[in-house]
Amino acid sequence: MTGPIVENTGFSSLSLQPALLDNLVSLNYREMTPIQAQGLPLILQGKDVIAQAKTGSGKTATFALGLLQALNVKRFRIQSLVLCPTRELADQVATEIRRLARTIHNIKVLTLCGGVAYGPQKGSLEHGAHIIIGTPGRVEEHLRKGNLRLNELSTLVLDEADRMLDMGFSDVLDAILLQVPVKRQTLLFSATFPHDIAQLAARVMKEPQRITIEEQHTASSIRQLIYRVPSKQARTSTLIRILLDHQPDSALVFCNTKQLTEEVAAALVEKGFSATALHGDFSQKERDSKLLRFANASISVLVATDVAARGLDIDALDMVVNYHLPRDVEVYTHRIGRTGRAGSAGLACSLFLDGEENRIELLEAVTQQELEETELPSSQEKRRPNSPPMVTLQIDAGKKQKVRPGDLLGALTADGGIKGAQVGKIKVLELTTYVAVEREAVKKALNVLQRGKVKGRSFRARRLGAL
């Protein structure tokens, strides 16, 4: 970990507004993470900051508190812009900013992302906002069409900048940067720091302070196993044997190409796994459905490319599998860092061929841990894949029908319905609501929703995926 040494890591040591500090206490945010302890003092001083840290480091609160501290609520102009590579990450950032700002009245936070209707976003912009969170393509479109003006912007945040460049947003970012004030604070967050990120930082930042949070994955946090595959053709059968041997409730399998994600997911489904592929060619609606079902434990295995999996917010991921060793060793540390988070034990398995030993040595040097070569499990013919513990139900009603999570929970648990503990995550969108329920309670939950009422009205409900 490089950067300034911070002795006092309590949020109370920062010169934040009392309303922000009070809210942090109510949220039980007391001790800062390393990136917060090193980054926030610099951000609060108005300096440009480059922060290199992995997912789950607390980076969102780092820049969110900085821009909220600097915000002038009485000046109803766009003062902060946060650019994210994906809609999923933008939604997560917006949710976190709203949570941190809930004791400061009249703050308007607006998301501008592709994959959703353009018209309502234009209408919202006409009413103004303080903070914009969006994806580069949609933000640039609103700028180009004159719906969005950033002439009074004071803070620009590039979140997961490496993935924005990976996804081909370099020219779009340049177009946006032409329309933001030269005098501003710029904050750049990236999991990796390749040459193109260094070039971007040199173009858009002034005397930036750089912070690097090194995450050392040890045997106590993430167990790293490597399996020697006898041939290229045996990769998928080897993956199946590993999954049957470990029986994870949730596993993220990384493939290097879109076509492979489809092929591997299909092979897993054929063997009885609850699996799906995720890559950049799916529509936003399909992506949302897949991500939601994986996050709420109604799909067990997600087979994804690195870009598609960026911004995943999964509380507990049992296992990560590298179907191929990644080309970039920094990508490896980012992949395996998705398991073993929040103090829980994690498992990372990697497949490799004869002749790839030199790449294993590179990974060992980066992680400072000897990777554990393990014998392939037996054929596991008698073992069957575990069924996911939850099933997702879709209700054809959402925010437009004024449905709230509490309404749905009340309908499901009322009059001898199902137990509250059997209800998982509830996601209310504009016209649709998704709810996860325990597998044994699915039929009863569907019966309650199909025959009962939510907010005095009957709505269509159905399950997603096979039971």
Image (cartoon, rainbow, N blue to C red):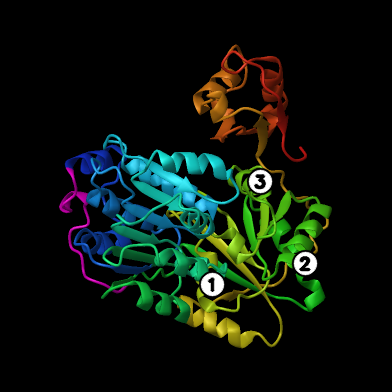
Which residue was labeled with disc 3? 285
How busy is the neighbourhood of tag 3: few (under 14 within 10 Å), some, or many (20 plus)? few
Which residue was labeled with disc 2? 236
Kind of residue at badge 1: Val
Q: Position of residue 307 (x, y in %)?
A: 59, 64
Which residue was labeled with disc 1? 331
Compare marks 2 and 1 and give the one earlier in the sequence. 2
Is 465 above or below relative to 115?
A: above
Could you say which is closer to the camera, residue 305 or residue 137? 137
**Quadrant for the N terminus in the image:** bottom left
Is 119 above or below relative to 90?
A: above
Kind of residue at badge 3: Lys
Of circles 2 and 1, the one toward us is 1
Kind of residue at badge 2: Thr
Outermost front residue: 146
Of circles 3 and 2, the one toward us is 3
Q: Are marks 2 and 1 in contact (CB under 8 Å)?
A: no
Q: Which residues are magenta?
A: 1-17
**Magenta region's main secondary structure?**
loop
Residue 383 placement, left or right of 11: right
Q: Position of residue 85 (x, y in %)?
A: 51, 60
Q: Secondary structure at mark 2?
A: helix
Residue 15 colored magenta?
yes
Compare marks 3 and 1 and give the one earlier in the sequence. 3
Could you say which is closer to the camera, residue 6 or residue 286? 286
Residue 183 placement, left or right of 445: left
How busy is the neighbourhood of tag 1: few (under 14 within 10 Å), some, or many (20 plus)? some
